[in-house]
Amino acid sequence: EALKQGDYETVGKKMYETHIGLSRKYEVSCPELDFLNDVARQCGVTGSRVMGGGFGGCTINLVKDELHDGFIKRATESYEQKFKTKPKVYDVIIKDGARKLS
C-alpha cells in the first residue's frame, strides 16, 4: 500500500525491517549483505534489504538522488577494503512496473 501511495519512507523502513528478519530469523543473509545493509543505514539510504536467493545474493537499495553518488562510493570502497573484492553495482530507476497488457 505504501508503495502505491508513493510513501517511500515507509517502504524504506519496511525494507530495513525485512532485512533484519531475513538475516536473523531466517538466516538467509550473509556477512557481506549485512555489511552493505549497515553501510546503507549509515549513509542515510531510505531502504535496503537482501534480494534474490540470499546466501550471498545481493541487496536492493532505495536511494535518494542526492545521496546516490556518495553511497555508491562509500559502499564500494568500504566493501572492497573489508572483503578484498570489488562489488558489482547495478543502477536501476523505478518505473511503472509490471502490468497486464491488453
Image: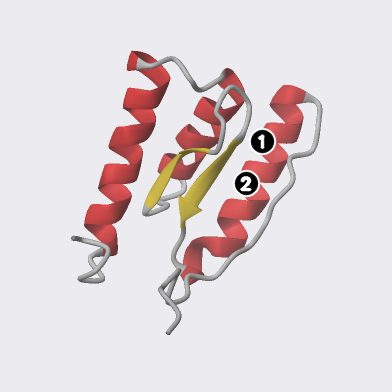
Q: Residue at x 32, y 24 (%)?
A: 21
Q: Residue at x 66, y 35 (%)?
A: 78
Q: Which mark is residue 93?
A: none
Q: SS at mark 2?
A: helix
Q: Residue furthest bottom?
A: 102
Q: Residue at x 71, y 41 (%)?
A: 77
Q: Position of residue 14 (x, y in %)?
A: 27, 44
Specify the label residue 78 is tagged with: 1
Label 2: which residue? 74
Name the residue type under label 2.
Answer: Arg
| Left or right of 10 in this view: 99 | right
Coordinates of residue 7 in the picture (x, y in percent): 23, 65
Which quadrant of the rendered structure holds the C terminus?
bottom left
Q: Amino acid at mark 1?
A: Ser
Query: Is residue 94 or residue 43 the one in the foreground?
Result: 94
Q: Looking at the picture, how far across and down is residue 44, in whole percent?
A: 40, 51
